[in-house]
Image (spheres, rainbow, N blue to C red):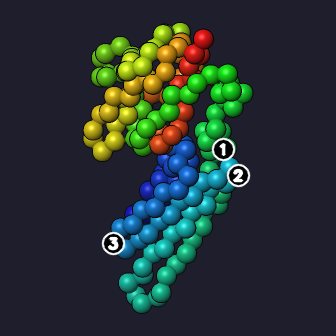
Amino acid sequence: MDLKDIQNLIKFVAKSGASEVKLEMEDIKITIKTGSERTETTILQQVPSGISQMVATPAAAQAPAQVAVTDSPVTEEAVKYIEITSPIIGTFYRRPAPDKPVFVEVGDMVSPNTVVCMVEAMKLFNEIESEVSGKIVKILVEDGTPVEYGQPIFLVDPS
């Protein structure tokens, strides 16, 4: 794994909103922790020449500022609206297939058991159903982006 791959991994983790990612391969261990202010990366690499270990921490400037924003979006709106959250970690999709229409749009009415999106995890596409009744007022996640367990993906007005 070269430096460019590590930098791309850091950018991907920062955009995904994940709080911590650990990657272990034969000769390298990488831990990336994101917080509200910065991203911290620790790389432990076994050197074949007998040198013990090398620890590097790339500059926190590589982490985009939006890392903190994705952790708790729109808190004022969340007070009067109900959140539909992701029940699993994976990739969020608004439509069942690229050539199909989206499951729901802003303004659509949903009820319990209405499919609102899909989350793909390990090549399995999981239909996510609404557990509440109401009107979709905001879609909090872009199509094709990673989501975490418990991350809000829709705001619903229950009235």
Q: Quadrant of the C terminus?
A: top right
Q: Which residue is mark 2?
A: 37
Q: Is residue 114 above or below residue 119?
A: above
141 relative to 92 in the view: left or right: right
Label 1 to label 3: alpha-carbon separation: 32 Å
Determine whether label 1 and label 3 are within 8 Å by CB.
no
Q: How many discs mark residues in the rendered view? A: 3
**What residue is shown at x 51% (from left), y 28% (from top)?**
84
Where is residue 103 shown, x and y percent of the image?
39, 17
Q: Quadrant of residue 45?
A: bottom left
Q: Is residue 148 above or below residue 106?
A: below
Report the front residue among 23 and 147. Answer: 147
Determine whether label 2 and label 1 are within 8 Å by CB.
yes
Q: Quadrant of residue 42?
A: bottom right
Question: Badge 3 local density, few (<14 within 10 Å), some, or many (20+)?
Answer: few
113 relative to 22 in the view: left or right: left
Q: Earlier in the sequence, mark 2 or mark 1?
A: 2
> Disc 2 marks which amino acid?
Glu
Q: Earlier in the sequence, mark 1 or mark 3?
A: 3
